[in-house]
């Protein structure tokens, strides 16, 4: 009985016994292996491609990235703060007004929303006090104090504690607070509109 070595090599390939065939030193089996290699490659490549693609998608996260609208609003308010610091009087004023509009419409946690709006109104008060009529500045201060109150209420303080905090926020204290904060972010210089 004779064996066809080519058929034997194909059998080894199909049954997964490729290792013994590769280790063989017989020339005819070696030739059969050479002819069989493309079969192995073509049979393994088609299922391998989707597996690699799926693995890459899983590792790299091929899902759509959803941006949180609330965080986008905070990011926008940070950019508007930079405009306030670097812009002229008109741009500083409009950036504060835009910050208030963006944050009021954002779906933020109440304490965070109140904090950002408080800072915007406090800065608007200082800007208006330095550059325009006292009545416009006072209106901004009333709004700043309101949001300061809301911030303290949302943080869990009692009405008495929140009320005491608001009473301590005088016009001069608000101005000092804003100046200190802005100068820390501008290496002691302050917003550009103050230098004009």
Image: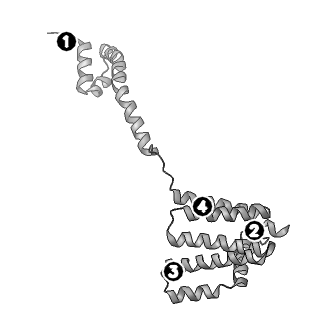
Provide the secondary structure element on which disc 2 rests: loop
Q: Earlier in the sequence, mark 3 or mark 2?
A: 3
Q: Nearer the viewer, mark 2 or mark 1?
A: 2
Q: Earlier in the sequence, mark 2 or mark 4?
A: 4
Name the foreground residue: 135 vs 154.
Answer: 135
Q: How packed is label 4: few (under 14 Cα within 10 Å), some, or many (20 or more)?
A: some
Name the foreground residue: 63 vs 168.
Answer: 168
Q: Earlier in the sequence, mark 1 or mark 3?
A: 1
Question: Farthest residue toward the left?
Answer: 1
Is label 2 in contact with label 1 (beta carbons under 8 Å)? no
The percent coordinates of residue 101 (x first, y second) are 61, 62
Q: Earlier in the sequence, mark 1 or mark 4?
A: 1
Provide the secondary structure element on which disc 4 rests: helix
Q: Tell me the residue that label 4 is attached to.
A: 102
Q: CA distance from mark 1 to mark 3?
A: 91 Å
Q: Nearer the viewer, mark 1 or mark 4?
A: 4
The percent coordinates of residue 174 (x first, y second) are 69, 80
Up the image or down, 9 lies above or below 196; here it is: above
Q: Is residue 53 left or right of residue 75?
A: left
Provide the secondary structure element on which disc 1 rests: loop
């Amino acid at each position: 009985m004779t064996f066809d070595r080519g058929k034997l090599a194909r059998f080894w390939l199909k049954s997964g016994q490729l290792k013994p065939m590769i280790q063989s030193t017989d020339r005819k089996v070696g030739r059969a292996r050479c002819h069989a290699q493309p079969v192995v490659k073509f049979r393994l490549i088609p299922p391998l491609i989707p597996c690699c693609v799926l693995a890459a998608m899983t590792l790299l996260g091929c899902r759509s990235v959803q941006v949180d609208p609330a965080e986008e609003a905070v990011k926008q308010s940070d950019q508007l703060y930079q405009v306030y610091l670097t812009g002229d009087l008109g741009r500083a004023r409009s950036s504060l007004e835009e910050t208030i509009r963006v944050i009021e419409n954002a779906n933020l946690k109440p304490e965070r929303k109140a904090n950002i709006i408080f800072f915007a109104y406090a800065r608007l008060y200082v800007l208006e006090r330095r550059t325009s009529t006292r009545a416009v500045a006072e209106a901004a201060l009333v709004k700043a104090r309101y949001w300061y109150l809301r911030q303290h209420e949302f943080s869990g303080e009692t009405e008495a504690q929140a009320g005491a905090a608001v009473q301590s926020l005088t016009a001069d204290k608000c101005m000092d607070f804003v100046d200190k904060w802005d100068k820390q972010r501008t290496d002691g210089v302050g917003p550009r509109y103050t230098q004009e």
